[in-house]
Amino acid sequence: MRIGQLGKGFVFALVIAVSAVAARAQSQGKMQPGAAAKVQTAAEFYQEYLVAFDKAKKIEDILPYMAAENRKQAEATPKADRDKMFGLLKIMGHHDVKVLKEEHAADGKTILTVAGVDSDKAKSTGKVTIVKEGGAWKIGEESWSSKS
């Protein structure tokens, strides 16, 4: 399969989730009955996303986690290309992802510095932009680089 055959949806997917961030993230604990609701941090949201990505069978399973602009691009991609794109994301995904740092920008975005292991078992670091839309966290941009 050649990248050119995937169309522009493939490029979108690599920008969004090259991390394919499919982490084998640690599952989060459940809230106890009667406990006060805790505000979710961007890092907690990202860990939740990683668990969802790991379980996802198709890109539609993770659309609720995507920022509106990214979701719109994904939904505009022809279904066959979306399926191929998602398959590549799963293959290229990162595992054992940990959030190292959470920085809050003046524009309301949160930048997470993350580390994990890529599909070639190389240590990787990344930056993930988390945005608030309608009061909920969403995945904006994500980029990774592997150490040689």
Image (cartoon, grey):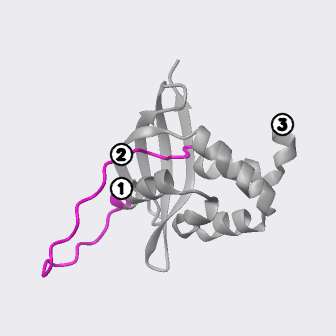
**Secondary structure under the numbered disc 2 in the rendered image:** strand
Q: Residues within 10 Å of mark 2 (few under 14, many from 20)?
A: some
Label total for image: 3
**Secondary structure under the numbered disc 1 in the rendered image:** helix
What label does residue 2 carry, if any? 3
Contact between marks 2 and 1 (CB within 8 A): the answer is: yes
Amino acid type, label 1? Ala
The span from disc 2 to disc 3 (Cα, nearest Å) is 33 Å
Give the vertical position of 124 relative to 75 (above or below). above
**Secondary structure under the numbered disc 3 in the rendered image:** loop
The span from disc 3 to disc 1 (Cα, nearest Å) is 35 Å
Task: Based on the picture, tell me whether residue 21 belongs to the magenta stretch.
Answer: yes
Q: In terms of sequence position, does the residue under pointer 2 or pointer 3 come before the other?
A: 3
Q: Is 15 on the left-hand or right-hand side of 123? A: right
Task: Based on the picture, tell me whether residue 74 belongs to the magenta stretch.
Answer: no
Amino acid type, label 3? Arg
* Residue position for label 2: 99
Q: Nearer the viewer, residue 123 or 112?
A: 123
Q: Residues within 10 Å of mark 1 (few under 14, many from 20)?
A: many
Q: In terms of sequence position, does the residue under pointer 2 or pointer 1 come before the other?
A: 1
Q: Position of residue 14 (x, y in %)?
A: 66, 46
Q: Nearer the viewer, mark 2 or mark 3?
A: 3
Q: Is 97 on the left-hand or right-hand side of 120? A: left
Q: Residue at x 51, y 32 (%)?
A: 118
* Residue position for label 1: 43
Residue extent of the magenta highlight: 18-44
Q: Is 32 on the left-hand or right-hand side of 98? A: left
Q: Residue at x 28, y 58 (%)?
A: 28
